[in-house]
Image (cartoon, rainbow, N blue to C red):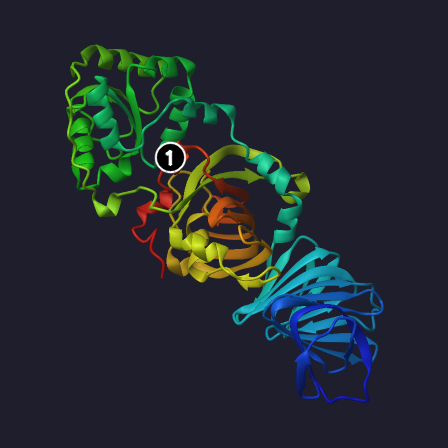
Amino acid sequence: VWNMQRPQAVRIAEVAAADAAMLERAGVSRALRADEAIEHGDVVTVASGSAAIAYPDGTRIDLGADSSAAFRRDGAGKRIRLDRGFAQASVAKQRAEAPLEIATPHAAIVVLGTRFTLAVVAAGTDLTVDEGHVAFVRGDDRREVAAGQTARADRDGLDTWPISPQALAREREAIVAAITPYAEDERLFAIAWETDLQVARQRAAAEDKPLLIWAGWGHPLGMGNTETVVARRVIAADARFQAALARRFIPVAIDSWMLTKAEDEAGRFYRAAIASAGRADTTNDGFFVVGADGRALASCGGVASVDEALAALEQGFAAHANHGAALAVDDARDAAFDHRLPPGGLALTLRARRLDHPGASWRAQGGIGRDHLWFTADDCLKLIGDAPVGTHRSLDPAVARHIARYAVADSTIEEWTEWMPDAVDLLAIDSEVVERTATRVRLRLSGTIDLDEGSRSCRVALIGDVVADGGTITRCDLIIAGTFRDAAGERLVAIHGAIAIRPLDQRVAPHGMRDRMYLQRD
């Protein structure tokens, strides 16, 4: 029970630093000043700046923007009530009978000596432990949270995460290295793939070359499915296949799921070409040599051998007879399947991989999944924001939900669908402004995400760096890691997202674009 009745002035700590912060003492508020005393019952409120409170034993509490904390002493023990906001604590060793206790609206933290971070919002309290361990208490439920773990208290009780954002930050380089793509996965980009069938048709007619359409259920250059992933390594990355394509074909990679549904000229052209090739299965995956007029000249399946693919190329090239006729195409698109990066948008390439548990030094397992994440121009503005240096704020809710639903996916398995809106059980992503000048902004993202749809769920931590130069985002680096569960069991998966540097990567639609709400925000 908090008893804030003030005894005669009792100095319990002092202000190590203060910026845009207020002190309330005995009902009177004024600006907080560096080096002044903190007395029993004082309340420190931070608006847009920060404040640091230091105790004589070396314990230090750093408060972020939009925070409010009350300080008191209970016998020999330190007591803090954090009503809202962000606090980083470095706690010197305390006596067992006099621990430091921090109360929030949702739980209590009991500490004998450690480093940890607290974030308090209306929905709950997030605890991340950097060193040692902390007792997290809500009613009769008491959890020991160890270094590298994150926990949350809310109206539903207490829950813990296997990986904390701070642990991800320490292991960033090792995680990124574990998700580095195989050389054969990157070799397929030696081909100058088109991704727009209408553009490819015009080029084919103008240059008097046949089309080589690589169709995959899930974009061949994106997430893809099992057949597509096999075709990447066995066929598309093969030096003989690439040499056969060079100068003789217009290569175009498309998502067969999208074009089998699109009611526009590109969709009708694709469906007619597939029918002409005699293929009528449910996915229409594979390699198709097609004339600019839509006539199928040769084809082979996506799991064919390289020799079969080469034979199809030779057969199709021999049958080609276009004579360089000009081609006018209808550029009107089916809005539901017009999967082009919106003007001013930002494209990220996502790579995912299963890993051993952190204690095993992030050993990689199996293949690497691949996908993309798009942000709208409005998303980019919300990411950059206008808050001053030192500000800790929750990431814009719509942008945070977009990341949770479409970036947090185990793309190492085929056709992993986006999360439904009601799958978001917990979403707590903090944005800290670490640099802001007239021309440059740098943000640090940190948080946790909990998704649950019954048959599948995941619990992950996230960190990120965002840099904008001259109002344009030039760096957006995300690390996401945690446990994924479905019918196959539970596994640890890590995801790395970075700005798509290759123009080709910027043109490959994310798997999540199958959801017509992908570029809309609620």
Residue at screen point 45% across, 38% down: 500
Q: Nearer the viewer, residue 153 or 432?
A: 432
Residue 51 position by quadrant = bottom right
Is the C terminus in the top left, top right, bottom left or bottom right quadrant? bottom left
How far across and how far down the image is residue 197, in percent? Answer: 25, 31
Residue 237 position by quadrant = top left
How far across and how far down the image is residue 442, in percent? Answer: 56, 51
How far across and how far down the image is residue 287, in percent? Answer: 29, 23
Asked whether, in this view, residue 67 is left or right of residue 212, the answer is right
Q: Which residue is mark 1?
A: 225
Residue 65 position by quadrant = bottom right
Please say if 446 is above or below 354: below
Residue at screen point 29% across, 51% down: 516
> Tag 1's secondary structure?
loop
**As shown in the figure, which amino acid type bears the numbered disc 1?**
Asn
Which residue is farthest front? 438
Residue at screen point 37% across, 35% down: 224
Mark yes or no: residue 176 visible.
Answer: yes
